[in-house]
Image (cartoon, rainbow, N blue to C red):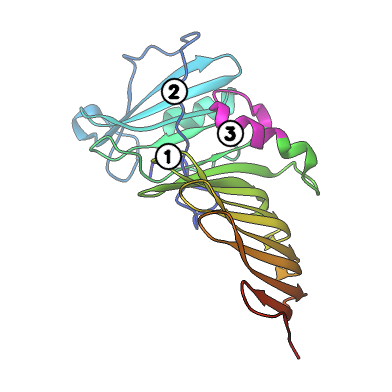
Amino acid sequence: MSIFQCKFPFLNLMAIIILAITSNTFAQDDAIYFDKQWIKCQEDQAAYSRTLEEQDSLIKVVDYYYKMGVQFIGYVKNTPDVIHELKNYGKFELGPIGVGTYFRKNGKRDSGVNFTPFDKHYGVQPEYLALLDSIDTISGNTKNLTFEISYFKSITVYGFVLNEYEHGIWVKRSLKTGKVLKMSRNYQGELDGLSKTYYRSGVLRGTYHYSNGYEHGERKKYNRKGILVQSRIYEHGTLKETWQYGKPKKVEN
């Protein structure tokens, strides 16, 4: 990992962010060098290098595999203390950062980072903005709310985390088609509210209602043609009633 130790290590997180350079306080030739343990060193001992650029109220941080490609691109708040840390330390707990992407040596995205709403529209891709705008509808104190993105082989998963718990809307989307495969609502780590799943074609697959982590209400399942084929009624996690296409309704004991 680079300078930023992920606040939530249980997620393999990342964001795709490329921003235009608006100004340049730190010359890119003034690289800072770190060894394999991310300890500051001379160039002849370097395994990584770093450049810093000022962009409005943020600092753009670019870490490189020495004489190779990019290892990390991220944005942090522009303060003297932060600049000092960036120039002298490879790994440290920085606190809230803007946006960031990690890369492997082959150029592919690797493990990731979190996005905090302190500047929520700065460089965020349009498909995420609507979700970020829903911050205003999320219950609870959103001061520590972060927006996180995780990339896997064929899907991406993104949503909000509050105090280390999934909170608010979470989305699973196909990387190939861009279609949403699942959308759920959470409250402090527990499913709460309406969740929906979709076939890869985009057809609705099922709807689920939760209360404090338990199914509560009607669960509906649809076939690939969009026809309702099953319904179940739950009360606080207990199955009460079942209906299946072509069969009579069954009341559970």
Q: Nearer the viewer, mark 1 or mark 2?
A: 1
The residue that appears at 50% across and 58% down in the rendered structure is: 10
Q: Amino acid at mark 2?
A: Ile
Q: Amino acid at mark 3?
A: Tyr
The answer to whether residue 239 of the structure is visible from this angle is no
Determine the residue located farthest toward the top in the rendered image. 23
- Dot 3 lies on which element? helix
Q: Which residues are magenta?
A: 118-133
The residue that appears at 39% across and 49% down in the rendered structure is: 152
Closer to the chain start, of discs 1 and 2, is 2
The residue that appears at 46% across and 28% down in the rendered structure is: 17
Q: Disc number at residue 228?
A: none
- Mark 2 neighbour density, 10 Å: few (under 14) some (14–19) many (20 or more): some
Which residue is disc 1 drawn over?
A: 177
**What's the magenta bit mostly, secondary-structure-wise?**
helix
Q: Is residue 125 magenta?
A: yes
